[in-house]
Amino acid sequence: MAIGLTEEHEALADSVRGFAERNITASVVRTALDADEETRPAFWPALAEQGLLGLHLDEKHGGQGYGLLELSIVLEELGRAVAPGPFLPTVLASAVIDGSGNAKACAELLPVLADGSRTAAVALDGSLTARRDGDALVVSGTAATVLGASLADVLVLPVDADGTEFWVAVDAADVTVTPVESLDRVRRVAKVEASDVTVTADRLLDDVTDRRVRDLAAALFGAEAAGAAGWLVTTAAEYAKVREQFGRPIGQFQGVKHKAARMLIALEQARAAAWDAARAIDDLAADAGFAAAVAADIAADAGVQTARDAIQILGGIGFTWEHDAHVYLRRTLTLRALLGSSKDWAAEVAATALGGGRREVVLELDEDAQPTRERLQAEIAELAAIEDKTERNTRMATTAGPSRTSRSRGAAPPGPSSRSSSSRSSRPPGSRPRTW
């Protein structure tokens, strides 16, 4: 299973994977890893031309009119390629801005972020404060670790103004951006410092909250972590098939095969959690925060754990600089650190669940399944109304008989389709412009 479930989603994933195989090769990643300074990758214009940067944005802002679910599919594939460059920081920033009620900010910033002519980054935390100056805010302070800030033209920052939370969009030229030593040297972090920077009313991101930003980050970071985990599971499993010890492949040893199986389980959980978080946010579900918290806990941790397990299965070669396993470990550890402690996210999930919070489960069935479901519901209601146990058992055996008989003749039971329950997943092909 991957994040994309429909045929259209699978086509999108195949397209992005093909682009990555052609343009984000091992040498491209190694060039970014070994570079003294982070630069925009050479494939950036070609990536922008695919229309993927605006996949989740409205068409009136130069986007494709889809949602976070489609964007998560792209991020999974780019995560598999451990892509350098500002794609993730930019789409996170545009998603945050898109949720603002400030029409001027959206009209000014979203088109240039969608076409790739400008890039952006988001500070998930910091110590920035502001004082009011009429309709404007004067911002000062520091955000110590901002993913992609060195390559960003626009920075989305959280500020505190006399106890009130604001989110603002500032030009990178108006602040000081200082690269810092980064664990992930393929895509690095930087420090952002503001000193009496005036933010006018058309750059105040109304209606954006810290919770909303963290939910978006959880969904998108989780999708990329799932992509990285996918590469790690495949790499470890393929190596275990050919590496021999004591006269047979190491994949035949119980300790190795069980570790590989646990990696696959973690990967599937990460994909499911990232998919659900993106779908919930797209659908404006009341429990979207719960789904995002699950993704922040499960998907990010799965990325780190599969990286560690892959290095163990790879053995000595997995610890070398020449093998790419450490690049994926660096990437997943950075995603985990930027999202915050998994213990905090797990505590939030537990508190919500103990308070009765649940994600609604909806199965989208084939159209011809509905009459069968209605018939079965009526039969079950009749059975439930029978108080005598012997009579009820007799009726159950009689009622179930024809169903088993029809099954034996080859009739297939109605079941859930492979489509997601998201309304976006049900769009007919061609109902939206596509560039992939």
Image (cartoon, grey):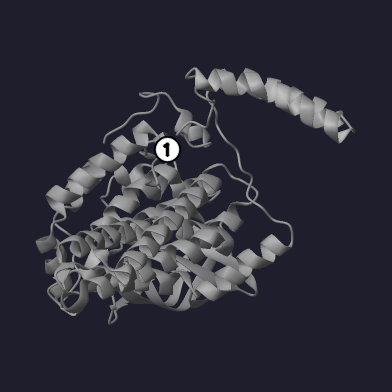
In-image side of 377 versus 15 (left or right): right
Quadrant in the rendering for residue 259: bottom left
Tell me which amino acid carries mark 1: Tyr
Instruction: Return the residue at label 1.
Output: 66
Quadrant in the rendering for residue 336: bottom left
Image point 27% across, 34% down: which residue?
A: 435
In-image side of 2 versus 313 (left or right): right
Quadrant, the C terminus: top left
Image point 53% across, 25% down: which residue?
A: 413
Out of 380 and 276, give the one closest to the viewer: 380
Out of 114 and 352, give the one closest to the viewer: 352
Crowdedness near tag 1: few (<14), some (14–19) or many (≥20) residues, C-alpha within 10 Å: many
Residue 69, percent from left and from top: 44, 44
Residue 71, percent from left and from top: 38, 46
Vertically, is 365 above or below 48? above
Helix, strand or loop under label 1 = loop
Number of numbered labels in the structure image: 1
Out of 220 and 229, give the one closest to the viewer: 229
Vertically, is 162 above or below 172? below
Residue 248, percent from left and from top: 17, 66
In-image side of 278 versus 436 (left or right): right
Vertically, is 44 above or below 170? above
Residue 349, percent from left and from top: 61, 64
Furthest residue toward right: 387
Does the image show residue 331?
Answer: no
